[in-house]
Image (spheres, rainbow, N blue to C red):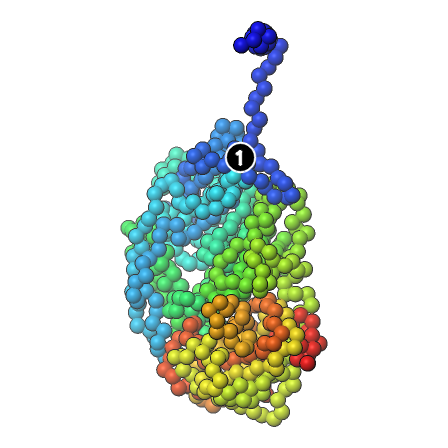
Amino acid sequence: MKKSTQSTILTAILLLSAGVLRAQPAEKSVPFFKNGEAQIVQAFEDPEKWIRHDLWVETEFDTDGDGKLDRMHVAVTRPYQTDTENLKLPVIYVSSPYFAGVAPPTNGLFWDVKHELGEVAKERVHPEVTRTGNRPIISNSHIQKWVPRGYIVVHSSSPGTGLSQGAPTVGGDNESLAPKAVIDWLCGRIPGYASPSGKEQVKAFWSTGKVGMTGTSYNGTIPLAAATTGVAGLEAIIPIAPNTSYYHYYRSNGLVRSPGGYLGEDIDVLYDFIHSGDESKRAYNNATVRDQEMKNGMDRITGDYNDFWAGRDYLNDMAPMKAALLMSHGFNDWNVMPEHSYRIYKAAKDKGIPAQIYYHQNGHGGPPPMKMMNRWFTRYLHGVENGVENDAKAWIVRENDEMENPTPYDAYPHPEASNVALYPHPGAPEKGSLGLARPKGKTTEKLIDNYSFSGAALAQAESTDHRLLYVTPQLSKAVHLSGTARVTIKVASSKPAANLSVWLVSLPWNQKKTAKITDNIITRGWADPQNHASITKGEPLEAGTFYELSFDLMPDDQIIPKGQQIGFMVFSSDKEFTLWPDPGTELTIDLGATTLQLPVVGGAKAFANALND
């Protein structure tokens, strides 16, 4: 070492000891932002340094009958600087009934759908869930995405699942109040506890009191459930493919209708599927929730909307809601169908809540691009004025685009979309026409129900007695559909009850293995003619008597290419979704009183132009 270097070090030591120089504290690790987005902070990146712990939060309900308020199991993942540097951060919170495992795929778990409408199906099997997982980690979801960007990630198991106490109710009040309690704890309003029954308290001293929630499917439903309580501190939610009404999930316009891919599922099946909580409490929960409340309320006989279903419809609970809402859904999600997000987005927008919607063309799941989510949480949790509230209100992924590249629109439906009335003209058992002119005189056509034929097979058939199909001329220009199509059908049945199914299809059908779902199916809908007057009270049909009913198909935003035809297909039992009564029921359609209202960008003028060469 050189003498000059030694002299410099010695001088510094003497000055420090004399108090002339002071040691500079290390720079604290804090979130930082670029272009309105939270950036990855190197000091927050190392998972080995994250602090992970769990606790229980006491709720205001007792649903497992033990005389004690139920406590929810909560797990926390946070940067170590929240301990060493007194750093406070906002929270991204995810809750789920799935974290501790689900029921095995047992034969008989689902309801048997092969029976007459209005009949009681045979009893099904009730499997037990074997709970999985080890403390203190409930889930590793979302932590890699958000902890390095300056958030704390919190997970909780919903009531009656995992190590959370209580009973699963599949949309009951406790599934809204449980996340509310966790948020109250995160905001310092109620205590957390180190054990399920002890009194040792755990405080969220590291929380800023700003909470956002997200998740997919059931995990996306819970953020909405929490938001409907109006709990202070829940600033923003990003529900992805959320189930916003269990009636709309298991019924359609009075009809018993399964979610796509789960034929025979109903709300009690989902209860059995998720019931992973304390084994000693399951018998009580089964007796009170599944075998009493659900059995008496779900009504697989009529499919009517009642108080049981109304209590599990979050649209009815939105009055207190104030959390900023970014919705995400797939237009071709035939499990949790796209109406679920649209109905809540529209209500939130009407209430003046900051709201945006992202729709893609794929199936179940699919979050918005990371940039959108980041901007949303940055604005409402970190308080960075990035102008996200001034961004486009609707983001639609076009048919051939990647999900990361949505097209912005001022609104959904498209502001220039308006309904165009189309009318069917006879052609059974082959194809009839579909056009702008109403048919002259009274014309009727018949179909014969037969669940053996899938909707796809019926749409492709050149001739069949099992559906009625009406098609437009070949389009000379592309037609942009945006919004909710609505059908009015005047129908008579040969039996007191019948399924009624409607598909809109793009023809000719693309049979290639590489075909996208948007190449063939435009949208779908189902209804019970017995509920022609009201979904709250059906009535048996008189054979041969015509009844008029109107109902919406699923919302969509799709560009039908030049050269295609739009097909309006009416049939009875839908093999993928409805009950399977014995074949043979005859449905007669009065074409003169049947209308399809199609939401077309540019309205009737644009549609008429697309029909002209």
Q: What SS does tag 1 mark?
A: helix
Task: Judge whether 323 appears above or below 552 on screen.
Answer: above
What residue is pinned by disc 1?
Answer: 42
**In the displayed structure, does residue 407 sit left or right of residue 516?**
right
From the top left corner, tell me how far across and down residue 401 is, in percent.
58, 60
Q: Residue at x 47, y 35 (%)?
A: 46
Residue 204 seen from this side: no
Does 543 sit above or below residue 234? below
Q: In the image shown, does 396 or 108 lie closer to the viewer?
A: 396
Q: Is residue 514 above or below residue 80?
A: below
Name which residue lies at 42% across and 42% down.
75
Q: Is residue 132 left or right of residue 526?
A: left
Residue in view at x 41 percent, y 46 percent: 139
Q: Residue furthest bottom?
A: 441
Is residue 290 rendered to the left or right of residue 400? left
Identify the residue at the far front of this view. 2
Specify whether 401 is left or right of 538.
right
To which quarter of the image does residue 592 belong? bottom right
